[in-house]
Image (cartoon, grey):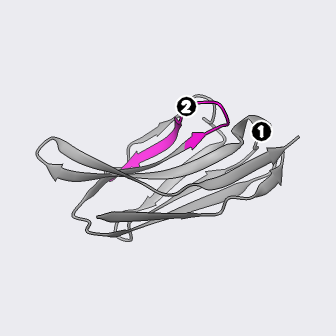
Amino acid sequence: QVQLVESGGDLVQAGGSLMLSCAASGSIFHIVAMGWYRQAPGKQRELVATKTSGGNTTYANSVKGRFTISRDNAANTATLQMNSLKPEDTGVYYCNARVDSAYDAWDDYWGRGTQVTVSS
């Protein structure tokens, strides 16, 4: 089993910045990707940013140019630097880890979430 723990969520004014951190532990063989997803009230969970062990990144269009995801592969950690925050960024942010389980197969693990609230 893999456990993920997030930290860094807070209340911040529009235009401000926050940094979220995620640490993975447990029965880890190889994490092929880590990322961040968020869920706003009344909406489905959506991708924010992901980064593979090879360094490839994916960002939601709404956060491009404002958010940056970083990874320490050896330490199994991921960081999301969020700048120029908007009220629309408000939601619960979840850390995700995709772990190899077999050839062309994987398991997804999720943290408990951390609340980010951006006031206008």
Note whether 88 is above or below 108 in the view shown: above
Residue holding disc 1: 86
Amino acid type at mark 2: Gln
Quarter of the rendering containing residue 15: top right
Residue 97, position as x, y percentages in the image: 37, 53
Question: Residue at the spot x=72%, y=42% of the render?
Answer: 90
Q: Hey, which residue is sitting farthest left in the picture? A: 103
Q: Is residue 93 left or right of residue 3?
A: right
Task: Give the CA separation, mark 1 to mark 2.
Answer: 19 Å
Residue 51 located within the stretch drawn in magenta: yes
Q: Residues within 10 Å of mark 1 (few under 14, many from 20)?
A: some
Q: Nearer the viewer, residue 53 or 43?
A: 43
Segment tinted magenta in the rendering: 38-53
Q: Is residue 69 magenta?
A: no
* Residue at the image point whose x is 67% and y is 36% from the top: 41
Return the x and y of residue 106 as percentages of the image width and height: 23, 46
Please give the label number shown on residue 44: 2
Q: Quadrant of the C terminus?
A: top right
Task: Classify mark 2: helix, strand or loop.
Answer: loop
Quarter of the figure with the N terminus: bottom left
What residue type is disc 1 on? Lys
* Foreground tag (1 vs 2): 2
45 to the left or right of 96:
right
Q: Residue at x 44, y 59 (%)?
A: 71
